[in-house]
Amino acid sequence: MRRFFLLLILNFPLWAFAAPTILVYGDSLSAAYGIPRDQGWVELLQQRLVEKGYSHRIANASVSGETTSGGLSRFNDTLQKTQPSLVIIELGANDGLRGLPVPDMKRNLATMIEAARKQDAKVMLLGMRIPPNYGPGYTREFANTYQQLAQQYKLPLLEFFLDGVAGKRQMVQDDGLHPTAEAQQHLLDNVWAVLHPMLGKPVSRASSR
């Protein structure tokens, strides 16, 4: 019997004994564009998890300028490398800013959601909105895509990731698009409100408050 358990342990993948991983898969909004990386909301999320007594570790695979097509092209490889238990998908803003076809964006996001679920990972979706540069029809179709995907796959959805930040001069950099370092805590609070119920109980109550 002891020999059996020893063989079981030796042949069990090492990641199975590691802390659960949260994969953040986004674009410049999650890659701390224009500010020190350790001031971005993803790094602040790791700090909050520790403070609240959670053992989760963050894997940030966000790339500035990423579209849903680019994200999809490297998604399966990233899943294999990180083995996440939960995936936060924050993509689509660059599709919208470039006026790319919304059905393609929806299909790319859906493929990533399905791939994550095949890996038994929970998925949280961060919704985006865009200025009406391409007309009200495109703007509406773009925003509705996140709602439709959340309903179709029964996903936790943050309806607008930049809520409370977009359009506020003191919250965005000089380019008018990217959040400042001061805005990152607000972004974290937006995400935390939806993410927290997905995490279950912390492993330690020492710092949970």
Image (spheres, rainbow, N blue to C red):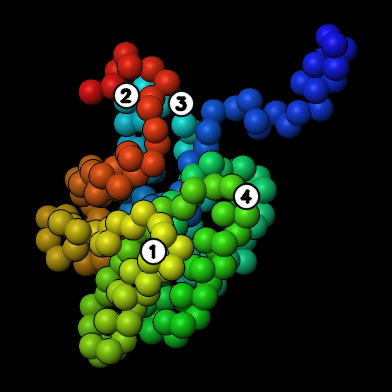
What amino acid type should be assigned to the residue bearing mark 2? Glu
Q: Position of residue 130 (x, y in %)?
A: 27, 74
The residue depicted at 38 percent of the width and 66 percent of the height is 151
What residue type is disc 3 on? Ser
Query: Residue 72 at x, y = what percent?
Result: 57, 66
User: Residue visible at 62% across and 66% down?
Assistant: 73
Q: CA distance from mark 1 to mark 3?
A: 27 Å
Q: Mark 1 highlights which residue?
A: 150
Which of the labelled discs sits on residue 51, or is there none? 2
Which disc is residue 177 wearing? none
| Quadrant the N terminus occupies | top right
The residue under the point 12% across, 61% down is 168
Residue 35 on image: x %, y % = 32, 48
Pointer 1 or 3: first along the chain: 3
Choose between 112 and 151: the one closer to the eye. 151
Q: The disc labelled 4 sits on which kind of residue?
A: Gln
Which element is circle 2 on? helix
Q: Which residue is mark 4?
A: 119
The answer for how far apart the CA atoms under marks 2 and 3 are is: 10 Å
User: Is the residue 192 above or below the residue 123 in the image?
Assistant: above
Inter-mark Cα distance, 4 to 3? 20 Å
Tell me how many marks there are: 4
